[in-house]
Image (cartoon, rainbow, N blue to C red):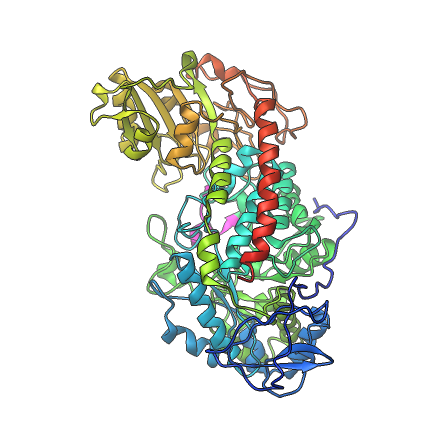
Amino acid sequence: MSASIPPSVNRRKAVGVVVGGAVIASLGLGALPMTAATASTIETAAAPDQPTLESRTTAIIEVDGLQFRDLDKSGDLTPYEDWRLTSEERAADLVGRLTLEQRAGLLMHASLTGNGTYDREAFDPLLETGHISTYISRLSVPSAILADQHNQLQEAAESQPFGIPLKISTDPRSGFSVTEGQTVSNGDFTPFPDAIGLGAVGDPTVTLEMAEIISAEYRSVGISEALSPQADLSTEPRWTRQNGTFGSVGATVKDQVRAYVQGLQGGSDGLTPDGVATVVKHWVGYGAQVNGYDSHYYYGRYAAFPGDNFDEHVLPYEGAFDVNAAGIMPTYSILQNLEIDGEEIEQVGANHNEFLLQDLLRGQYGFDGVVTSDWGIANDCPQVCRDTQPPAPFFGSWGVGMPWGVEDLSLPARYASAINAGVDIIGGSDQPQYIIQAVQDGLLSPERVIDAASGVLAQKFELGLFEDPYVDPTAAQAFVGSAESRAVGTDIQQKSLTLLANDDETLPLTVAPGTSVYLYGVAPEAAVAAGMTVVENAADADVAIIRLVDPTGGDDLTDLDFTGAEEDFVALKAAHDAGAITIAVPQLSRPLVLGNVVENSDAVIGAYGASDEALLNVITGAAQPEGTLPFELPSSMEQVAAQLSDVPNDTADPLFEYGFGLSYAAVVAPDPTTPPATPVAPAPAPSATAPDTLAATGTDASLVFLAGASLLALGVGLLVAARRRIASRG
């Protein structure tokens, strides 16, 4: 078995600094420094190629009638300050001026800490002594505060000897699911379904539209890198990270990944100055986790490919390569006993795996962006760490450590192992001394450090951060989560909702005056706004709407079925037994086993992250449920245990097949262009526990709704393009 070699590879082209519609004018002050009190964006119609500049502590100098930031405070134009040169030329000049200590700092991707504001006592030494200029932000505060905080950090960076700007990254912060270390609360940001919900929508143009909004919102607050999307496949039903994927079938996920990267980065040919660098993860095969275990834990460190289906797990990344994704993040996992061309690959995590990073990623696929390791891949995992399993967190008194396959190496040797394997920047680390020691000990060459540091710097030049790293907090507050963007978000949430069962055409629900409703997991205010009267007891209700969360059952918390003891299921059964029209809304973060949910409901709507407003719009018929399942829903845990971890949609007798989804107007046939699951098997008969409507599958909504969606997408696309130009520079 070998990974497919693409017929052609689109390598990244050098991207110049953005040409603003307005350009700066000479101050007529030579190289006098601008103070924080007088700093501003200076604009005029002087030179057509002059980008917008902004400085707070450094001078703006004039050369050949053009203006440049004097970041090294030399009084002269240094090549890396010259925006007329390519990003690669500027990076080469700058890295040649740095010491080993400064270069090592560029290879760190540290964490910003703090509550409400960033902890400057923790940050300042990392910047000033560690020379670290790439950070992840997990701060969830109002957008104006976030923008101001980033401006303050950028001002501190500008004051350093070479004025290297910060690249600030984030985990996804536009979805509904919040998991420590994986996602951030959306706060002011426009809420969209989790990525798996975009798989349910099944339209890459919708994903592109969403990504453009996310990109503009990120840049407006000073975030220039997204640790997303997940190009992993949802092939092991028990795996905990499926809500971050776009689904289970490689060909369709490839299209979604391509659209997301294009929307975030601002174009189809790589990173643009107003875009956001994407770090596509987790290269490669993370979705095939043995027993669905989480590879943050030592016991879950293996992914396996018993179905010989590794190539399909590579396929989604081709969508990222098509549009020149800026970054790749390898998986923690060891690809257990995987053979390529008859040879077993090294049994180390992908962050340390030369075959996966050099031979496959850079060699066969020609990727020439930045490889960012996942967090903690060089840290210690002592015995207490190795013994830890859920529900205990994977971090503890030892810190965070996932050095799978290299546990017995020294810290400098682990850092060298990752960098030599092909990693350019170590995620979650603020310890550049181990890079320095690895060089001094002969474990890592100075040339490899220069190569990695140059790639990191080149992306900062491509993003325009060396010209203007600042944003306008007031503009950010007006732009982030605007009414227009939220309308798009609500529309996509509605589109994603998947109607799984609808006995006797229960839905759409006719709400007459006085219709009473019992709620579980739904805010009363939303039901009142929909014209219902909320009651406290299901026995007094005409209708019951019950949200159900992932039961995460069993000793290892991987079970997908409801035992009947869960509080939300108890509420569902009680309402159904009381005679209320019962609507179940399971959250499909994983492919749940819903047999007893269907038995105790009159209608079932699968959700992937949707507001109460969006949900009630669909329930009442103000909007259509248009989603189709991005993965099959199995009938039992026994069938889940028997499936192959690397093969999508292969349980023997699924309760709901991949691509299933009902419509209010009619039940329509599957889209013949949708690639089938692998391997193809005869379609099983519907489960005896499911309603008669389970025999039908569908992927289309009404043409009227599609036409309306297209017009909405066009209008919002024009809006986003205009607002991006405003928001990205204030």
Return the x and y of residue 204 as percentages of the image width and height.
62, 39
Horizontal relation, residue 94 to residue 547: left or right: right
Query: Where 545 falls versus 425 (above or below)?
Result: above
Q: Could you say which is closer to the camera, residue 619 or residue 434?
A: 619
**Residue 308 in sight in this render:** no
The residue located at (54%, 57%) in the rendering is 727
Q: Quadrant of residue 121?
A: bottom left
Q: The N terminus is located in which quarter?
A: top right
Q: Is residue 429 above or below residue 236?
A: below
Q: Please, which residue is most extreme toward the right here? A: 7
579 or 335, nearer to the observer: 579
Is residue 571 at least partly visible in the picture?
yes
At horizontal 68% and vertical 60% (from top left) the residue drawn is 358
- Which is more toward the observer, 645 or 545? 545
Q: Position of residue 420 (x, y in %)?
A: 62, 68
In this rendering, is residue 22 above or below 666? below
* Residue 551 percent across, percent down from the top left: 35, 35
The residue depicted at 51 percent of the width and 31 percent of the height is 495
Query: In the shown orientation, is residue 83 left or right of residue 406?
Result: right
Percent x, y for residue 72? Answer: 59, 83
In reply to whether residue 205 is colored magenta, the answer given is: no
Magenta stretch bounds: 290-302
Report the front residue among 114 and 640: 114
Task: Give the total of numbered labels.
Answer: 0
